Amino acid sequence: MLEKIQQTAAFLKEKMHTHPETAIILGTGLGSLAHEITEKYEISYKDIPNFPLSTVEGHSGKLIFGKLGNKDIMAMQGRFHYYEGYSMQEVTFPVRVMRELGIRTLFVSNAAGGMNPDFEIGDLMIITDHINLFPEHPLRGRNIDYGPRFPDMSEAYDHELIRQADAIAAEKGIRVQHGVYLGTQGPTFETPAEYKMFHIMGADAVGMSTVPEVIVANHCGIRVFGVSVITDLGVEGKIVEVSHEEVQRAADAAQPRMTDIMRELINRS
């Protein structure tokens, strides 16, 4: 796999004329940030050797390079999910390519179901930790020498970035929550009993992404900041039937606040 990672990185380096150290996975709730990138150039996933293709509605499928404020960045518009049929190596392949390209900080976002009774639909939850319930571990197999065989995960989400994000939210008057994100394979939304169990386990929100990329980023020595948009509620008495379209609408409504925090945090980090 290392050969493929290096082949892909070499291809991208030939196309790149910027030197980003910051990457963003433009998950649900962060799509509008792409419009704020200036001096940008784009490369479609289908043109990148060894890259998977995103199959999810609302995920565009391209790498964007350019500037956000005064900072060179690269952004993934469209991520890969285990439920699409990809292996964990494929899901996390772009993060390893980022490491080869010199990325030092990764920002991620997602849509999640909230299980904390204090949460409301549309809340932004800064991820402080996660629980990994994916059936395949992204570091399973031969260790790639980006990090140790048994990487430490005691600070999977960078404490200093969380502190800065809290300060920015306070300055801008944006309400944020903190919580633990639980990652499952999907693609079904959770049953009421599953929501209840996950909350008992210590999770505040649940979704179908993010955890694999964060694990691999930590293995690669890349620091991480993550935010969930609470798009539906798995709280007893508040559970209603949910669809992908409703999740998308709730995330779209939260985008301006999410974008405000991320834009400022990226420029300060």
Image (cartoon, helix red, strand yellow):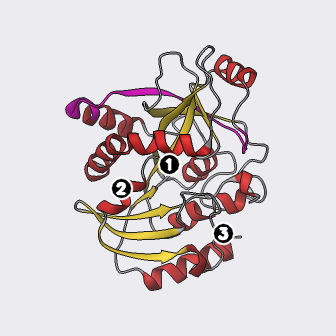
Above or below residue 195? Residue 148 is below
Of the two numbered discs 3 and 2 on the same chain, state the one appearing first in sequence. 2
Q: Nearer the viewer, residue 190 or 222?
A: 190
Looking at the image, do the residues carrying marks 3 and 2 touch, with CB atoms under 8 Å apart? Answer: no
Residue 174: give x, y in percent of width and height.
29, 31
Residue at 52% of width from left, 65% of height from top?
A: 60
Residue 135 appears in view: yes
In the picture, residue 189 is in which quadrant?
top right
Q: Residue furthest bottom?
A: 14
Q: Residues within 10 Å of mark 3 (few under 14, many from 20)?
A: some
Residue at 72% of width from left, 45% of height from top?
A: 187
Q: Which residue is mark 1?
A: 28
Residue 132: give x, y in percent of width and height.
68, 37
Q: Which residues are magenta?
A: 169-188
Q: Nearer the viewer, residue 67 or 31?
A: 31
Q: CA distance from mark 3 to mark 2?
A: 23 Å
Residue 1: give x, y in percent of width and height.
71, 70
Looking at the image, do the residues carrying marks 3 and 1 touch, with CB atoms under 8 Å apart? Answer: no
**Callout 1, which amino acid?**
Thr
Q: Residues within 10 Å of mark 2 (few under 14, many from 20)?
A: many
Res 50 label: none
Above or below residue 22? Residue 227 is above
Of the two numbered discs 2 and 1 on the same chain, state the one appearing first in sequence. 1
Kind of element beneath mark 2: helix
Q: Which residue is mark 3?
A: 52
Q: CA distance from mark 2 to mark 1?
A: 11 Å
Q: Which residue is mark 2?
A: 33
**Callout 2, which amino acid?**
Leu
Of the two numbered discs 3 and 1 on the same chain, state the one appearing first in sequence. 1
Residue at 49% of width from left, 62% of height from top?
A: 77
Residue 226 appears in view: no
